[in-house]
Image (cartoon, grey):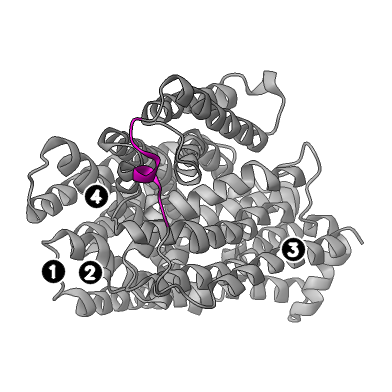
Amino acid sequence: MFSLISFIAFTGLVAVVSYLKTHKDDHAHGKSYFLAGNMLTGWVIAGSLMLTNLSTEQLIGLNGNAYTHGAQVIAWEVIAAIGMVVMALYCFPRYWKGQIATVPQFLERRFDKQTRQFLGAVFMFSLVTNLLPFVLYSGAIGMNTLFDVPEMLGVSDTAATWIMVWAIGISGGIYAVFGGLRAVAISDSINGLGLLIGGLLIPVLGLAALGDGNIFAGWGTIVRDIPQQLDPLGAEGDNIPFSTLFTGMLLLNVYYWCTNQSIVQRTFGAKSLKEGQKGILIAACLKLAGPIYLVLPGIIALQMFGPDLEKQDLAYPSLVAEVLPPALVGFFGAVIFGAILSSFNSVLHSSSTLFGLDIYRGMIKPEATDEETVRVGKRFGIIMALVAMSLAPFIGKAESLFTLMKMLAAVTNVPILAIIAMGMLTTSVSTRAAKISLFTGIVLFALANFVFANSIGLHWLHVAAIIFAIICSLMLILSKVYPLKKSREDVALKPETEGAWSWAKGLGFTVVVMVFLIYTFLHHIGSA
C-alpha cells in the first residue's frame, strides 16, 4: 500500500507542477503550442533532451544487451555525446537561422515543399511503427515486474501487458496532446531529477548487494570474476565491433541527435541560440554518465543471476526487484513511469507538430489558421497514440528489444541523414536527385538488413555506413543528370553566428576528449 501511495504522490506532484506552470499558456497558436513560445532555457532543454531520450526501452533494452554483450554497448550512450556536439556546433546554428519548427520545414528551404511533405510523412511513419510502440511495450514490462501487476489484478502476463500499455498511452497522450511543448519540457525536467536519483540508486544497490554492503567490494567482484564484460572494444562478430564506432554507430547517433524531430524540437523552443547550444552541450556532458545506469546494471545482473535468465530484457527488472527496498518501490515506479511518459509524450507531440505544420498546412490546407492547425495536430496525435497502443503488445516476440528497435529505425534514419547532410554540406545536390536517392536508400537498407542479411555477411552498422555512402554518391551523380535549377546562393544553408555561446567550442572539445578517456579506462580494466 505504501508503494502505491508514494507512486501516486510523486506522479501527481509532476502533473500538478506542470499544470500550474503552463495552464495559462496559449495553446491555440502554433508558436506557443509547438515551440513553447521560445521560452526554454538551457537547463530545461538539457533536462528535456535527456528525458525524451531516456525511457524504459533503454533502461530495459540497453541493460538487457549489456547482460548479454557487456560494456561494448556503451557506444549507444557515449558515442551519442559526439552526435550532440555536432548538433550544438554545426546543425543547430543553421536551424536557428531559419527559425523553424520542424526538420522537414528546414529542408523546404534547401529543396522544395514536396520534399518537406514527403520527409514529414517518413518521419511520422518511423515514429508510429518504430519508436512509440517500443516505448510503450518496454514500459509495460518494467511496471509489470516492479509492481507485479498480473498478480495484483489477477490476470495473465499478456493481459497485464495490454492493460499497462493502454494506461501509459492514455496518460502520455493527455500530456502531449493537451499540454503543448512547454508542459512536456517542464514535466521532463522534474522527472529528470527523480530519474537521476532512482537510476543511479539501482547500480549502487546492486554493487552493494554483490559486496555484502560495500559497493567497492561489489565492483571488485565484477572486475575479478567477469572483467571481459567491462571491455567496451568489441571484436568482429560481436554485438558492436569496435570498427562500427566509426561507421554506422556514429552516423545513427548523428541522425538521432541532429535530425530526429522528437529530439531537436526541444532546441527549437529555446529562448536564444546561446540557450539552445548550452542545453545541448549540458545534455552531452550528462550523457557521458549514461553507462552507469544504462549498462552497469546489466553487468551486475549477469554477476548476480548468471547467464540463465529466460530473456535478456528481464535483466534490469529482475535486478530492480532483487535489490530495491520495498519502501522505495513506489518512488522508483513513479520515476520509471515519468521516464516512459517523457519519451512517449515527446514523440507524440512531435508527431502532432509534423502533421499539423508539414502535412495539413503544408499539403492539405495551406490557408489554415494557427488555431485550426493546432486543433488538427492534436486530433492526429490522438490517432497516433491509439495506433501505437494497438501495436505495442506484439513486440514481445523479439529476442532483443533494443537491437530490433535500432535496426528498424535505421531503415529510414540513414537515408534521411544522407539527404540532410548533403543538403547542408553542398549546394550542388538538386531536388530531384535528393528525392530519388531518399526512396532508393530506404529500399536498399530494408533489403540489405531484412532480406539479404545472411548473404551479405557484414555487421548491420557497417551496412548502414555503406548505404549512406551509396546514397550520397547517387545524389551527386544524379545531380549531373538532373542539375540544380536554383542558384547556389539561394540554397546555401548558412549558420547563425550572432549570439552564439562563447563556451560552446571549448565544451564540445572537452566532451570528445572524455569519450576517448572513458573507452581507454574501461578497456584497460577489461583487458587486464
**For residue 156, above or below residue 258:** above
| CA distance for labels 2 and 4 | 16 Å
Q: Secondary structure at mark 1?
A: loop
Mark in front: 2 vs 1: 2
Query: Circles 2 and 1: CB distance less than 8 Å?
Result: yes
Identify the amino acid type marked 2.
Gly
- Look at mark 4 in the image and give the residue it sits on: 352
Closer to viewer: mark 3 or mark 4? 3
In this image, 20 relative to 297: left or right? left
Please report whichever mark, 1 or 3, sits nearer to the chain's N-terminal start: 1
Q: Is residue 141 visible?
A: no
Q: Residue furthest right?
A: 528
Q: Earlier in the sequence, mark 3 or mark 4?
A: 4
Q: Residue at 49% of width from left, 79% of height from top?
A: 327
Residue 389, by quadrant, is: top left
At x 73% / y 52%, what residue is drawn?
A: 72
> Can you see residue 512?
yes
- Say which of 129 and 252 sits in front: 252
Callout 3 amino acid? Phe
**Distance Cα–Cα, label 2 vs label 1:** 9 Å
Q: Is residue 76 left or right of residue 519?
A: left
> Residue 26, which numbered label?
1
Q: Which residue is mark 3?
A: 516
